Image (spheres, rainbow, N blue to C red):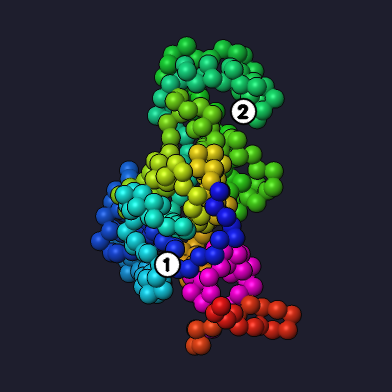
Amino acid sequence: MCSPKLAVTPSDCALAVGVPLFRETFLAQLADHENFDFARTMVGTGDPSFWWDRVYSPIVEVQNRICREMQALGVTVVQQARRADLIALFAKHRVVTLATHWHMSSISPDDIVDPMGMTLMLNKRDKTDSLGRAWTDFLGACGSQLPPDVNELRAALAAWLRTLADTANAAYNPRSATGGSPDADWSLTRPALERTLAGALKPARVVELIDGLQSLGEFIQCIPRNSNCIIDLSICRSALAFELIKYQRPECLLVVNRFPVHPIPRFLRYSLIMKLLARSPLPFLEAATAVHSGEVIFDEETSTSCRRSQRGTRPIRRQ
């Protein structure tokens, strides 16, 4: 098991950026709706170049500057991360941070790859768990008579599962009525349903890299089976992935986020963590907690990290 008390330095860490940081890449991804989602979330109507020049480019400038600063500190930075890059980074580094986009995917009839097999799985569910109860209610609503036509059955199952998943996924949206609720039922989210109904429900492509959206299973395959690294996934809604990653890579420590994250604060916090580790080796989780809680500030003029206390701040000295 990776010890949370193991001290690390920036040279033990890697940063993989899966969102576009260059104009050509951004515009190409914007035109490819099938394989990319992030660029479309950054634009409105009108000329795409306007949205790059006036909206996203200023964000990219900050991200690229921080990437250069992190490289100077000794962090391994991959600015256009592909799946092959993740495989290499996970094999070599104690801490891997992924800065990218999580695509919230709904459920369509095309996602139901085996409707008959799915009904058999659902009929075997324990009626006391969330999915089992929902299935019992669904059967009751349709008079226990499922559509005999396969395509009609596929459409009915998709509509039912979409309602369940969209309701559960809403708990990971702070603007929804259930956003932030401690009673969020992860078992009905899309990732959980994919595990429960494996083989009958097609895995969604949710993790965006420069070579396209990846399913959660494809992402997990990038991590060695015996890995005990720290995986910093504090990207939008990555808490949805926690259970599945931890189940398949139990020795890894995970840092996840429940809600959407703006790229600039995310990069700035990472920068502070690395600057803190450059001053003095610390356990990554301790450094991250100190920065996220506001316990640590960093003076750019003196390059000094300080911890807040009741009496003000005190420098963190090299040991």
Q: Residue furthest front?
A: 319
Q: What secondary structure is marked by label 2?
A: helix
Is residue 283 on the magenta stretch?
yes
Q: Amino acid at mark 2?
A: Leu
The residue lying at 34 percent from left, 56 percent from top is 81
Reading the image, the residue beneath label 1 is 11
How far across and how far down the image is residue 108, in percent? 44, 32
Check residue 84 for magenta coloring.
no
- Percent position (x, y) of residue 103? 44, 47
Q: Which one is earlier in the sequence, the residue at label 1 or at label 2? A: 1
Query: Where does residue 210 sit, x and y in percent of width and height?
Result: 32, 53
- In which quadrant will I find the C terminus? bottom right
Q: Is residue 15 left or right of residue 171?
A: left
Going by the numbered disc 1, the residue's amino acid type is: Ser
> What residue is shown at x 43% (from left), y 21% (from top)?
114
Give the residue at x 63% y 77%: 307
Which of the two discs, 1 and 2, sits closer to the camera? 1
Q: CA distance from mark 1 to mark 2?
A: 45 Å
Q: Is residue 262 left or right of residue 171?
A: left
Q: Which residues are magenta?
A: 274-299
Q: Nearer the viewer, residue 52 or 101?
A: 101
Q: Is residue 125 left or right of residue 120?
A: right
The correct choice, above or below, for 315 with respect to 5 in the image is below
Q: Is residue 101 above or below residue 183?
A: below
Q: Secondary structure at mark 1?
A: helix
From this viewpoint, is residue 114 visible? yes
Residue 298 appears anywhere in the view? no
The answer to which quarter of the image holds residue 24 is bottom left
Residue bearing the label numbered 2: 131
